[in-house]
Every structure is written in C-alpha cells, then in structure tokens.
Image: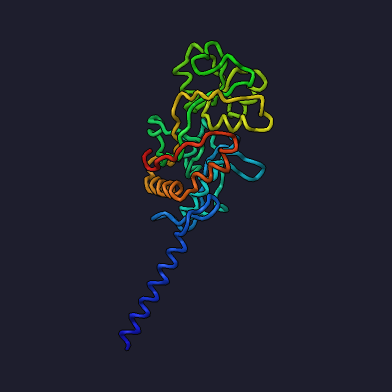
Amino acid sequence: MARTMRRIAAAAIAGLTVAVVAACGGASEGPNESPALVPGARTDGKLTIGISFDQPGIGLKDGTSYRGFDVETATYVAKALGVPEANITWREATGSDREKLLMSGEVDLVFSTYSITDERKQVVDFAGPYFVAHQDLLVRRNDTEITGPETLNGKDLCSVPGTTSAANVVQQYQGRITLKELPHFSDCVRALADSQVDAVTTDDVILAGYASEPQYQGALKVVGRGFSDETYGVGVKKGNTVLRDQVNEALKQYVADGSWRRALGITVAPSGYALPGPPNPGTA
C-alpha cells in the first residue's frame, strides 16, 4: 500500500510540473506580453538600451513614452532576459555615438536601426539580424527628376554622420552629389520639406515612417528604388558573448511565436511599407 501511495504522489507531482511548464510556455505571445525566459537569462536586474528617439514607426520618444518597432523588439528581448519594461532605461543612440555608448558601457544593448557591417564588428558584437531594410531616397512629392540613385548627379543629399547610408553615398557618388550631414534624420526631413536639400537618404523603412507623418503626408514620397541591403542587428559590447547569445535566443523566440510580425503590424505597417519575411536570428 505504501508503495502504491508513493507512485500516486509521484504521478501527481509530475502532472503538476507539466501543467506549470505548459502555462509558462503556452501559446504565442504578443509583443507586450512576457515571453518565457531564454536559457541562462537573468531573473532580475535592469537594462539600459539605446534606441532612436526621432524615427516614426521605429524608435520615437513621445513625451515620456517610447514607441516603434525597435522599442517593441527591445522590450520583448528584455523580458526574455528577465527584465520587465519598468526596469528598462531608454537612452538615445544616434548614428554617430552607438559604438561609443557600447564601448563605454553607458548602454547594455543598442536597438537603433543598427546595420551589421564588418567594420563595426571590429569594435562591437552583434546579435541578430532581426530586420532587413534597403537604402532608398525620400524626395518632395512633385519631384520628377530623382527616380533612383542614377539620377542624383548634381543633387544635394542629406544624411546623418556615422550611418551606412552616408558612407554608401560618399563611396558610390563622390564628386557627383553634395552630401549635407545633420545630427538627426528628422533634421534632414525638415530640410527637404523646406527645399534646402533635394533628397534624404537612409533605409526605406525609416523614410516610409517620415513620409506617413501628418505634416509630411502628400508633401514627400519614397522613391522606392532600394540600392543596398541594410541588415539590422542588436549592438552588444565587444566580447560579451553570453549576452549576445541570450539576445539571439530571445530573437529566435520573437520570430517563432509570431510576436515579430505582430510588432511590425502595429508599428511599421500603418505607413504602407511592404513587410518583408522574417530574418534568421543568430547568423549576424
């Protein structure tokens, strides 16, 4: 009888364990819900995360709140690491200071339309990718001269220092265009609307966000002739392979449970941008 009771107790405990695991791992979770912890993740603590503050649909500071695809992605990853949204400190990470912020330890992670390049890999590590965009051009709605990069001769372009967009146009179109660099892409877009430059160049998903803003609707348009692949990764301090691997696991989960596409649906899709297929995190 004692042996029988022990078997019954063991079965009950096993059943309870299965129920708890099922409750934790359950159905696909949305970008604002807590995903299951990735293996080896911390169970408490805080994170300082660098994002853009002025990119509609991607990373935008709105009063004391933050919204956009990079914000949704960063929040999901933080939760998978055991860090709730309330314990995230958001820090602005512009194109020219992302490496500095990571190298100095001022931020733990950077989610800021951060294209993975061999040059950047020399000084920081990347998890990801979590999105692939394409460099494009934003012009005034009535502009019929600029139809692609081959029509840029003699034009004034605007971009942001420290970005692959600026580096690409300098390398490919040196001597054919005049490049004006301003601190933020929002500065470039205002300069375009005010006819101070002929076009703004950066990733198409960023440009689509600006073109959909109320003050620019009907005034600006994306040319739609992407001329590079911009593969976004999560910046991690060089040598922190444990954190990099944990972020990769979280990103895989983000894609697999449907949260990646749902996040794009509420942040980027309203601009009219054609959503791409999911990337393959862990291959950065």
Find the residue positioned furthest to the left: 3
Residue 6 in the image, given as x and y percentages of width and height? 34, 82
Q: Is residue 158 above or below residue 96?
A: above
Find the residue positioned furthest to the right: 215
Indicate left or right for 254 with 159 as reference.
left
For the residue pair 83 and 17, the one nearer the viewer reads as 17
Q: Residue at x 52, y 31 (%)?
A: 95
Quadrant of the image for the N terminus?
Answer: bottom left
Q: How is the image coloured?
A: rainbow
Residue 34 in the image, given as x and y percentages of width and height? 51, 55
Residue 216 in the image, given as x and y percentages of width and height? 66, 28
Indicate left or right for 110 with 15 as reference.
right
Q: Residue at x 56, y 44 (%)?
A: 90
For the residue pair 248 and 23, the one nearer the viewer reads as 23
For the residue pair 167 and 155, the one nearer the viewer reads as 155
Q: Is residue 80 above or below residue 150?
A: below
Q: Can the viewer see residue 103?
A: no
Q: Residue at x 44, y 59 (%)?
A: 25
Find the residue positioned furthest to the bottom: 1
Residue 85 in the image, given as x and y percentages of width and height? 55, 52
Q: Can the viewer see residue 274?
A: yes
Q: Is residue 123 above or below residue 65?
A: above
Indicate left or right for 165 with 139 as reference.
left
Q: Is residue 8 above or below residue 14?
A: below
Examine the image and state in which quarter residue 122 appears: top left
Quadrant of the image for the C terminus?
Answer: top left
Total labels: the figure holds: 0
